[in-house]
Image: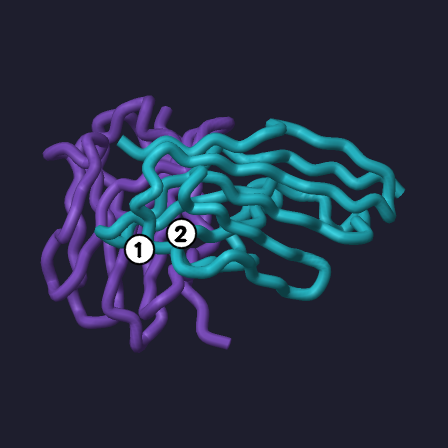
């Protein structure tokens, strides 16, 4: 059974710092991996999707990498801003199409 | 930009009552999903729906739950007899390729 784990559970950084969020999964037979942002009490906003055949994807200040064989993904956020404060969720898409989520990393960027 | 919508945003009900949560997926999407998130816990998959039938369901999705696409645009989740532990945020998602999520319905069972 696929399990997704995110480390750390919470992270607090000063504005302007670069940071890395980690995600690991137990079964490498994934179709793709998505990173989401969730603001308190809100829905899920897709940030990046990496296909199983890809190594990384970039969008603005965000870069996500995928090492399928080792079951790991990282989300790199450059030059963090207070507006980046949110919970970041990693989810793997299994062959059946459903998403299996990690518990998230709660990020706080202090001005 | 097309988006998934959900109604109501917040539903309060008494234990044992039936609730119907509604979703309008993005119009050209063919795959539909329900997930839930109990406060402080992971987002959990409930059910996927394709071609007017359930394609996969989780252990959570027992006989108290049902899904329907009644009119070609709406996608509903019904809970027949709510329990306290059904209190959660329920998210609908649809996809052509990437899953897009709605804003969620917060269900509170008293």
Q: Residue at coordinates 33% horizontally, 54% vertically from top-left?
A: A31
Name the residue nearer the viewer: B77 or B8: B77
* Count of numbered labels shown in the rendering: 2
Q: Residue at coordinates 39% horizontally, 46% vertically from top-left?
A: A92
Residue A44 picture location, percent across and down: 50, 51
Residue A73 picture location, percent across and down: 52, 44
Residue B83, by quadrant, is top left
Rendered hue of chain B is purple
Residue A46 picture location, percent across and down: 51, 57
Residue neighbourhood size for the residue with mark 2, other residues' Cα within 10 Å, grouped as few (<14), some (14–19), many (≥20) = some
Residue neighbourhood size for the residue with mark 1, other residues' Cα within 10 Å, grouped as few (<14), some (14–19), many (≥20) = many
Rendered hue of chain A is cyan
**Residue A46 visible, this orientation:** no
SS at circle 2: loop
Q: Which residue is outermost to the right?
A: A111
Same subunit, tags 1 and 2 = yes
- Identify the subunit bearing mark 2: B
Q: What residue sits right under mark 2 in the picture? A: B8
SS at circle 1: strand
Name the residue nearer the viewer: B86 or A36: A36
Name the residue nearer the viewer: A88 or B83: A88
Tell me which label, 1 or 2, sits earlier in the chain.
2
- Identify the subunit bearing mark 1: B
Instruction: Quote the CA–CA distance across marks 1 and 2.
Output: 7 Å
């Amino acid at each position: 059974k696929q399990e997704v784990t995110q480390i750390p559970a919470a992270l607090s950084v000063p504005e302007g710092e670069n940071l890395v969020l980690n995600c690991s999964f137990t079964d490498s037979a994934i179709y793709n991996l998505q990173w989401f942002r969730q603001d308190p009490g809100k829905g899920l906003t897709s940030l990046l999707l990496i296909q199983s055949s890809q190594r990384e994807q970039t969008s603005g200040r965000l870069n996500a990498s995928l090492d399928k064989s080792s079951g790991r993904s990282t989300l790199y956020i450059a030059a963090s801003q207070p507006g980046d404060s949110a919970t970041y969720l990693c989810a793997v898409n299994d062959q059946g199409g459903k998403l299996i989520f990690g518990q998230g990393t709660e990020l706080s960027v202090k001005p | 930009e097309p988006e998934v919508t959900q109604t109501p945003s917040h539903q309060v009900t008494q234990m044992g009552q039936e609730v119907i949560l509604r979703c309008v997926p993005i119009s050209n999407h063919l795959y539909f999903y329900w997930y839930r998130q109990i406060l402080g816990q992971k987002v959990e998959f409930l059910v996927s729906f394709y071609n007017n039938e359930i394609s996969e369901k989780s252990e959570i999705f027992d006989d108290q739950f049902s899904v329907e696409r009644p009119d070609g645009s709406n996608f509903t989740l019904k809970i027949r007899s709510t329990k306290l532990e059904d209190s959660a945020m329920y998210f609908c998602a649809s996809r052509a390729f990437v899953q897009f999520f709605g804003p969620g319905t917060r269900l509170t069972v008293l």
